[in-house]
Image (cartoon, helix red, strand yellow):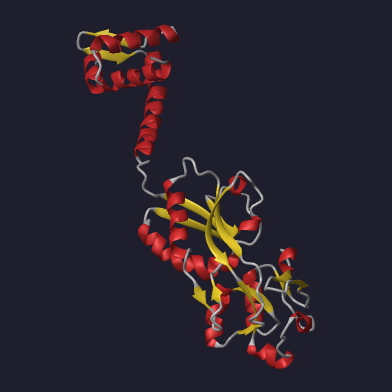
Amino acid sequence: MDISAQMLIFATVVEQGSISAAARSIGQTPSAVSKQIALLEDHVHYRLLNRTRTGISPTQEGQELYLKCKAMAEKFKEAEALISSFDGTPRGKLKIASSVAFGKSKLIPALPTFIKENPEVHISLDLTDREIDLQSEGFDAAICFAEQNKNPDIMVRRIMQSRRVLCASPAYLERCGTPKDFNELEQHNCLRLSTESKRNFWVNVAPDKKRSFEALGNFEGNSTDVIFRAALAGVGIARLPCYMTDLKFQSGELVHVMPQYSPPSTDIVVMFADRRNLSPKTRAFIDFLVAQFRNTPEKSRDRAECIGL
């Protein structure tokens, strides 16, 4: 038996007031407990207990050691209680990150359902379009485009496929006209992302129409959500995920521009550090995302299928 176990036994003996009472409380024989106390005394080179016919009492050195042993015993009980709480129930603080647009349009509206299903989970949500370092920043999970994951050691699970469309407000189109192809689009104010230069190249992959077009204009924003709101305000033509535009097409606040435009789709994924020993709260969140958003197609007004970001 190691020294820490002997210290726990010693604390129990002092609290119980006798060797026999301590032995009964921990399920050992009095002789076994006496032996461990003797070994502890040999280790510290001090007599720790005064033994009498009526019981025991700590020596001065024993009393000082008891206070340390008692504190250790309390920490041990706290650790035991924590371990016993690891029963597979999702609980505790869940720190997650999400792209701004997906977070506002899709994730936040779905969170009441997740919270209802997992009442012991406390959510901390960071909406950002910057690159996330899960491990150094302490995030349990992060939602982003698949191509944003540059760490081969990070696990990912697909949530959805995202298809983008071109759109503008009726006011902008009335003022500037409606382009019918990329040649005409070059004459328009196209809204740019300031944080992702690659996403400002709009590629058409329709049969016999593959072409790359760089969006140029007098406005740029640091998130898809900013571009979305600029398009609604009539600033210019934007390329946005279907899930953001679908309801606006139906309400007439946005118009689907160049419906023949067919950009490559992309996957939206949830990133997490390690599949092995994944905490119940993180596993529950990942499973919830997949169940909530996968295979939930949206239809744009022109019947082109859009599967949200």
**Residue 190 in the figure: left or right of residue 53:** right
Whole-percent x, y for residue 52 in the image:
24, 8
Q: Quadrant of the C terminus?
A: bottom right
Q: Residue at x 72, y 92 (%)?
A: 175
- Give the image quarter of residue 182: bottom right
Please, is residue 231 above or below residue 51 in the view? below
- Relative to 211, is 25 above or below? above
Rendered residue at 44%/55% (across/down): 287
Residue 294 visible somewhere in the drawing: yes
Q: Quadrant of the N terminus?
A: top left
| Percent of width and height locating residue 243 | 54, 73
Instruction: Let me know if residue 193 appears in the view.
Output: no
The residue sitting at the bottom extreme is: 174
The image quadrant that residue 192 belongs to is: bottom right
Above or below, 206 relative to 143: below
User: Along the horizontal axis of the image, is 151 left or right of 4?
Assistant: right
The quadrant where residue 241 appears: bottom right
User: Is 186 located above or below residue 45 in the figure?
Assistant: below
Residue beneath the point at 45% across and 45% down: 279
